[in-house]
Image (cartoon, helix red, strand yellow):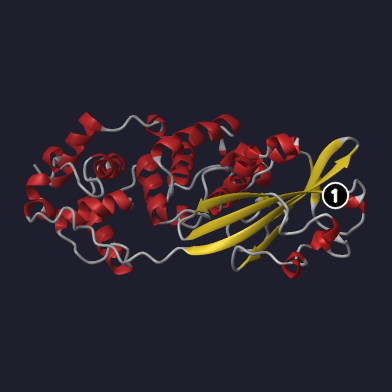
Amino acid sequence: MNFSSRLLQWYNENKRDLPWRNSSNPYNIWLSEIILQQTRIAQGIEYYYRFLEKHPDIYSLAAASEDEILLLWQGLGYYSRARNMHAAAKIIVMYNDGVFPNDYHELIKLPGVGPYTAAAISSIAFNIPEAAVDGNVIRVLARFFGIEDPVDDTKTIKQIRAIASELIDQRNPGMFNQALMDLGAMVCKPGKPSCEICPLANDCFARKNRLERRIPVKRPKSKQKDRFFHFFVLLVKKKDVKVFPVEKRKHNDIWKNLYQLPLVETSGMELTNEQLENINLFKGFDYTHYFKPTNTPIYRFTHLLTHQRIHAFFRIITLPDDFCHNFESEAEWVTFDEFLQRGKPVLISRFMEKAKDLLE
């Protein structure tokens, strides 16, 4: 029995019960694949249902506002995935009458669709024999064939993709791709794999040579960058309701197009009066009467991203009622409940939950 036969037999008996596998609808498959990029299955399922309930088809997704999409996405991180997904939906509706491209080379032209995602959609939705190579597949094939070059190297990935293309079952490419992914997720796991139940163990190079903990090889990780964010809640009462300014992040940085509180980023934990002048809202206003860095209560949080560690400091400052009329700024004044409905970083949501009683 060859590689593909053993793999598919194992898959038929052990495959994971995932909701998108009950459909050949390319929209559902595409949605699941975008969500699962950098996301655990358990968390992805929740968001998959959330998006389908709100936007059951490509037309609904394309017609939504970006703010609505980002709010639905909140908590998944890597927000460029959501923006690209929205852009792709608009392209499919505008230029292809809402019909998903059934060609790998057309799919890969869509924003946010790389080689893996294009291959997954092609094979699962349209039965096209394109090998979908993700981290699970790379791990399985590196161990099975004894590939000891770093698997995060472009040349090695190209080599593994070529191997997967030779192995793929021409009649059941979608099933083959999903089987290989499941084997990597359930059996050929990182660290200590469950080789004793693997259908490929007898011919696996790593297993036979006791290298299963050494392969796959990865290059040393780059050091996380520390960043220091100082956020301000500038509370003003407007018609007996508390409001505060928020703004949309515009630069090509983390959290682009999400809403945030006024922010100063510093090189360390300390915050000086000179640095406060970088906040547009304070320009032309004597803020020192209401705020002193040394005696204002601070809420502190640490937020970990893939390559960054965010040290966040939140300060709540109560200002005179007419403050929001005394300046020119793009900031928007909102209530606590209104801000809850905006797409924002999870870091700020954590703070909002902590300081709810003071902000409502």
Q: Position of residue 321 (x, y in %)?
A: 90, 46
Residue 182 in sight in this render: yes
262 horizontally vs 84: left or right = right
195 horizontally vs 260: left or right = left
Q: Position of residue 228 (x, y in %)?
A: 59, 61
Residue 133 in sight in this render: no
Q: How many discs mark residues in the rendered view?
A: 1
Q: For the residue marked with disc 1, what is the amino acid?
A: Leu
Q: Position of residue 21 (x, y in %)?
A: 37, 33
35 horizontally vs 342: left or right = left
Viewport quadrant of the N terminus: top left
307 horizontally vs 152: left or right = right
Residue that numbered label 1 is attached to: 319
Q: Position of residue 137 (x, y in %)?
A: 27, 50
Q: Secondary structure at mark 1?
A: loop
Viewport quadrant of the C terminus: top right
Q: Nearer the viewer, residue 277 or 125?
A: 277
Residue 25 vertical position relative to residue 65 in the rendered view, above or below: above
* Residue 145 figure quarter: bottom left
Query: Residue at point 37% right, 50% down?
Result: 119
Within 10 Å of disc 1 (Cα), the crowding (few <14, some 14-19, many 20+) is some
Residue 95 vertical position relative to residue 7 in the rendered view, above or below: below
Q: Nearer the viewer, residue 83 or 236?
A: 236
Q: Nearer the viewer, residue 240 or 11?
A: 240
Query: Residue at point 13% right, 44% down?
Result: 200
